[in-house]
Image (cartoon, rainbow, N blue to C red):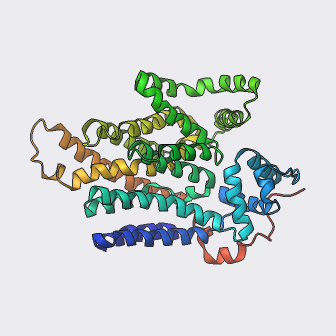
Amino acid sequence: MQITILIFLLCLFIFLVPKNYLKVYMCVCLFFLVASMFFLWPDNSFDLYRYYYLLDKYKQLSFLQVLGVEPFKLGASYPDLTVQHYVATYKVYSVFTWFISKIGLYQFLGAITCFIVYGLMFLRIKNMSGTLSAHRMTIISAVIFTLFTFDYIHLSLIRQCIAYILFGYALYTELVERKNKMQCFVIYILLCFVHATGVMLLGFRLLIVLYKKIGKFPILVGILGIYAIVPYIQNILERYNVYFLQVFLSKIVYYLTERGNIATQHASYKAICLYLLYCFIILYFRKYARQAVRYKDYTMFILFVLAFCIPASRQQDIFERFQIIFPVLMLPVIMELLEEFFGKNIFTIKMKKGYFQAYMGLCLLALGIGITVSAFAVNCHKSYRSAQPYFSFHNFMDNGDMSLSFIWSDS
């Protein structure tokens, strides 16, 4: 209930803030969100619990061991083997985590992740509001969209959140602003060593190059059938011992087979509605927006990701977690459309027969408001409600100590 009330109040009070102070207000929002994450101490049903516990293992390593320069061996327990796997495969995340473990305040891991995620989304709103000379309601709507559609509890997925948000932010810089292309590709590659899905996102980015040569339809059809060929690609890579890609593909196969057969695996209606909304927005944007040409490659990337999510609907882990990347990807598109709606065009146009664009734009705006509010309501009922006990200051004071016993045994 605490996080629900916080987000609701932040969205309510923003209407009282003058335009000149909206940037300051976003900083206030960021402060409260980060502070809430700092005092979250979950149980072992959250991935965040696992990441906190692994910090205790990272603390035992030296910097050279984390880099893989010096060998080490922790033990045979699950967390020991996990850290050894992370150090071998995800070195960028391991170095980041190692520094936090040495500080000794483990809650910094969740708090810094929260700062990166919401900080970059608010920074994008700030930068675009200056570039567009945005209407006050455009900025307010963008902030509310961010707070309502990003499930705060998804911050428990530390590595995925960092990889998705940094990738989405860099992608806009490269494809739309046309800046720092080399630096952005360096970021894309480094994110492959934060989480395996960084490889997938880099693959989608490289498809943009292919899209310019052969068009979008062959690629979209290929993406829709990708799950059928992943096991065969994995078998080919095993022959050539391409270790890193093997790890990535084996994880995909694992989610599609063993975890895909779990009876409770199903796509939520909330995620389905959000994906459909994003698809409608992108199609409308590509057809009618003033900036459609400038965003051509960027919006095609989003369509590629949405196409990938369609066959993933039978696998909850993959389907649900891709919600993380869409708020940062959709923010620029939504702000561009909102500026057209709230600025000069849609609301000043005299509706008349045959003016399809205006009617469709208003219907899309109404649909977007409905789905966004509904998505937040579902989060309030499920995610935020289930996490309520762990935002308690009393729970934090009683349990926020790594010296206490854990579910995982070292034996």
Residue at point 74% right, 25% down?
Answer: 240
Assign the C terminus to one quadrant of the image.
bottom right
The x, y position of residue 108, in whole percent, is: 64, 67
- Spot the residue most to the right: 411
Q: Is residue 371 left or right of residue 113?
A: left
**In terms of depth relative to the viewer, which is nearer, 257 or 284?**
284
- The mark total stands at 0
Residue at point 58% right, 41% down?
Answer: 318
Residue at point 79% right, 49% down?
Answer: 68
Q: Is residue 274 left or right of residue 383?
A: left
User: Is residue 10 depicted above or below 80 in this figure?
Assistant: below
The x, y position of residue 174, in whole percent, is: 44, 44
Residue 120 visible to an observer of this rendering: yes
Residue 380 visible to an observer of this rendering: no
**In terms of depth relative to the viewer, which is nearer, 386 or 288?**
288
Q: Is residue 112 left or right of residue 97?
A: left
The x, y position of residue 166, in whole percent, is: 53, 51
**Quarter of the view holding residue 38:** bottom right
The x, y position of residue 94, in whole percent, is: 71, 54
User: Is residue 266 depicted above or below 5 in this figure?
Assistant: above
**In terms of depth relative to the viewer, which is nearer, 234 or 11?**
234
